[in-house]
Amino acid sequence: MRITHRHALRRRRHRTNPFMFGLNLGFFAGLIWGTLRWLLYNMNFTNALPGFMVDSFFLASFLRSGWGQLIGIASFIVFSIVATFLYMFVLGRFRGPWAGIAYGVIWWGILFLALGPLIGIVEPVREIGYNTLASELAVFSIWGVFIGFTHAFEYHDEASREPMMTGAGRAGAR
């Protein structure tokens, strides 16, 4: 098959800007999964405040209010943007969902088992409850898959970069 100049230009034009991609991916990961965390909190599946990451900067009574919960979702968006760029630099070469699952579980472990109780943003493991731990583990796992698999699809899916074949080209390719 001959690659024409037009196909070569189309192939060159499809370059993803890593900064904008990471910013968009992190924003939507934070928005979607931060909103899910907010829903789980309001449905009493978890007792970790939506804004637990900014607990050091605000009073817990404020973080329970409507504006505080909005700040909680916004803080999860900022966290997700930073975590997305970290994923892109450290685990960006991996394909498939497994690196993303591991990434989400690692963040859950850091925030709910190791660093979070140590600095006081979440309760210690023996006090936080199994429902909270299981719900947050599920959300962080899915959040990690969202980041990891979206990144892998964008940067490792070569089929989307192939030129479209014309009708005559398809018949000759069989």
Image (cartoon, grey):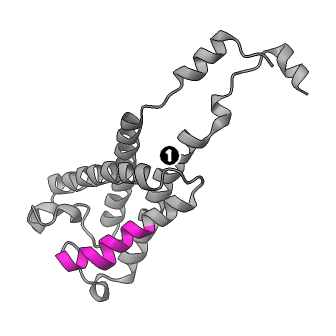
Within the magenta stretch, is there residue 74? no
| Relative height, residue 32 to residue 173 (above, below) | below
Mark 1 secondary-structure assignment: helix
| Relative height, residue 127 to residue 21 (above, below) | below
Within the magenta stretch, is there residue 108? yes
**What percent of the width, then of the height, locates residue 2?**
77, 16
- The quarter of the picture where residue 163 lies is top right
Compared across the picture, whether 83 is left or right of 11 comes to: left
**Magenta region, residue range:** 105-119
Magenta span: predominant SS is: helix
**What percent of the width, then of the height, locates residue 67?**
15, 52
Q: Quadrant of the N terminus?
A: top right
Residue ID at (70%, 12%): 4
For the view shown, which residue lies furthest in the top direction? 5
**What percent of the width, then of the height, locates residue 158?**
65, 36
**What percent of the width, then of the height, locates residue 45?**
37, 71
Front residue of 94/40: it is 94
Give, as a three-letter code, the residue at label 1.
His
Residue ID at (30%, 78%): 114
Instruction: Name the residue tied to disc 1.
Output: 151
Rate crowding at label 1 as few (under 14), some (14 to 19) or many (20 or more) other CA atoms within 10 Å: many
Q: Quadrant of the C terminus?
A: top right
- The quarter of the picture where residue 46 lies is bottom left
Compared across the picture, whether 48 is left or right of 97 comes to: left
Residue ID at (28%, 73%): 47
Residue ID at (33%, 52%): 80
